[in-house]
Amino acid sequence: MEVPQNNTGTGRSTNPPFTDVSGGAGSQSWNTAISGPGTQGSKSSSQKPLRPYVEPLTGSTPTQSGDDDFSKELFPPDHVTEVTAFTESTVVPRRNLGFLQTTSLMLNGSLGGGFFFTTPGFVLALVPSKRICIVLWIVGGIYTYLGATIFAEYGTALPYNGGALVYFDEVFHRPRMLATVIFSVWWILFATTEGNCKGIAQTILSLANGQSSFEPSLGLLNFTAVVIQTVVCLILFFARRLVFAFNTIIALFKIILMVFIFVAGMVHASRGSNSGFKDFNKEYPGYSNSQALTAMVYIILCYQGWDNANYVTGEVHRTKQTLKWARITSISIIGVLNTLATLAFYSVADFATVTNADGQANSALQWAQIVFGSSRGMNIATGIASFGTLVFITYTTAKVKQAIAWQRIIPFSNFFGRQDPYFDSPGGGLFLHWIISVIAILALGDMGSESRLFFSGIYSWGYQVMFVFLGIGLLRLEYRMRLYDDNWRPSYLKNKFVLIFVAAIFVGINIVILVITALPNDPGQVACFYWPVAIAGTVVFSVMYWGILRVFQPDNSKHRKALASRVGFEVNVYELGDEVPDDMRFAMYEAGLDGSKRRVQYKVSGPISRCLSIIQSVKNSLLRFLAY
């Protein structure tokens, strides 16, 4: 069935046919086609579950879809018009991210960041052999390629916005909605850009003060970080298209910067008498296998960000081909550049210099000071690179939060899931991300504080837990997808034994990372094993939240129906293939298009309903009063 497209050129419909339909978030162009049976009717043992596959239309002319049985079931005949492709409730994104944009998203998410600052010097301090460290960086690139292949497999099978949100819901489908709730709570609370904002704020204030080691007051640092986060969210809201026009430019800037670091480093090393090549093959004693393993963990964490594009796969054009070549190109560039830049850092100074306090604090600034006698230019360059990373991480993180809101499992979901119809930006998701990030910025200390490191550690540790379960879920992906298509096969890991081997390696490495990062820390510091404790607490809270939603779902339980009736609060969870009331039919149509295949409906009655009526009356009275 073809869904008509909006070809007005303005991104808005002049006559939206649906103006009062619940269950959606902001409007977008339905530049898609879906296939599959109708969603009406109860499930039976012989009926396959329905997950319509969304892919771009090849035609450009709006077409009438009223003669399609699926369309007739979902829409009353008088609602099927040429402009049904674009309404205030539409959640389907435009698939306009091609190869360059997708590759640039991966590059912007991974290149720079921690690599420019602590990782090269810190790794060499753990493993006092420059040659071994270079080998470890190459191994990190290989691991990253395996991880990117797994994510490309998921992204091709489930080409929707939300990334792991959609993947978990598919491969860990039972208990229903539990995996979704756990991931959503963790992502909303801990997936912030607080650290990115404070890092950029530190750079700006240092440049303004003229001292690379300037330590601003906490109040000034927090204020600057809040301003940065606010500016980024406003830019993404009002100028999303302009930002993506600079996506490739920012990625190209990072590539040129790292190539420049390598070339200038090699030239300096060939001319200098204190070249770092003099001790390049020397291996200093005093390190253990556990230190080498810890160094490997930090290298792997430094590579992170390559999965950036998976969170907006619903916007990627020709998903399979684009993800395939973007994965190969981006991971190759990231691996080569990280290795070459590390070689440049190690080539300009001896072991003692690279591993001193300055080298471990900021490798790039130390390199610039040695090569050019000044680090100001490098400070500006790394600040620009970090700002580019912040912009696109903010966008993809907000898109996941928007996808969470689409399912209506969080309060104010209609607002947080809104897609602005004029600017074509995830306004609700950006606002939710801004709120949580600003709270984190104000509540936590400076860059080296225990509270900030603990908070960021919860996110990083949770991210590795996510990788472990996605690796396990890969073994279930083919089974789940064959419920919808008997002929479905993996796109990249087609050999079953290769798939199992890759998944096992990926899971094993991430379990090692979890163990290493949770080992006891130095005396006087917050113990790292509190990270898994905090994650466990998040899971417990999520299960309780899920349990409350479950208790108030009447289903076929008399006790639950009685409880919902007595309290005056009822939760109905609809999935594709279920019978749904008329006011949820369009919402369920959207659920098939956005990949969530689910919508949650809340009903209130009794005292709760009366309280809400009073609140609404007071609100209307205030609005009338303010109008005068």
Image (tube, helix red, strand yellow):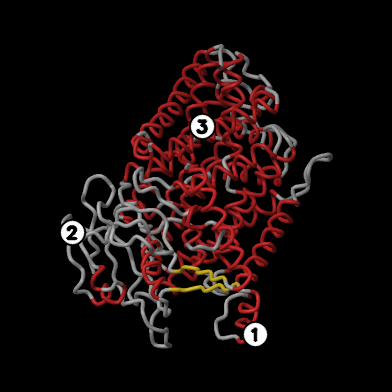
Q: Quadrant of residue 217?
A: top right
| Residue placed most toward the observer, 442 or 147 | 442
Disc number placed over residue 62 in the picture, else none: 2
59 versus 554 height, above or below: above
State the residue in front, 407 or 531.
407
Identify residue for label 3.
386
Q: What residue sits 80% from the left and 40% below the top?
A: 525
Label 3 neighbour load within 10 Å: few <14, some 14-19, many 20+: many
Say few, some or many: other residues with alpha carbon within 10 Å of mark 2 (under 14 / 14 to 19 / 20 or more): some
Camera-side mark, 1 or 2: 1
- Evaluate if marks 1 and 2 touch, with contact meaning CB atoms under 8 Å apart: no
Question: Would residue 453 appear left or right of 619 to someone viewing this image?
Answer: right
The residue drawn where x is 52% and y is 13% is 372
Q: Quick one: label 2 or label 3, which is nearer the N terminus?
A: 2
Give the Cα distance between marks 2 and 3.
42 Å
- All told, the count of numbered labels is 3
Numbered disc 2: secondary structure: loop
Residue found 38% across the figure and 66% down from its top = 490
Q: Is residue 390 above or below residue 600?
A: above
Left or right: 173 in relation to 279:
left
Q: Secondary structure at mark 1?
A: helix
- Residue beneath disc 1: 559
Disc 2 vs disc 3: which is toward the camera? 2
Instruction: Please report contact status of discs 1 and 3: CB closer than 8 Å, yes or no.
Output: no
Q: Position of residue 87 (x, y in %)?
A: 32, 57
Per the model, the C-alpha gap separating discs 1 and 2 is 50 Å
Q: Does residue 25 appear left or right of residue 319 in this picture?
A: right
556 is higher (above) or lower (below) than 21? below
Amino acid carrying label 3: it is: Ser
Which image quadrant: the N terminus? Answer: bottom left
Please name the amino acid that badge 1 sits on.
Answer: His
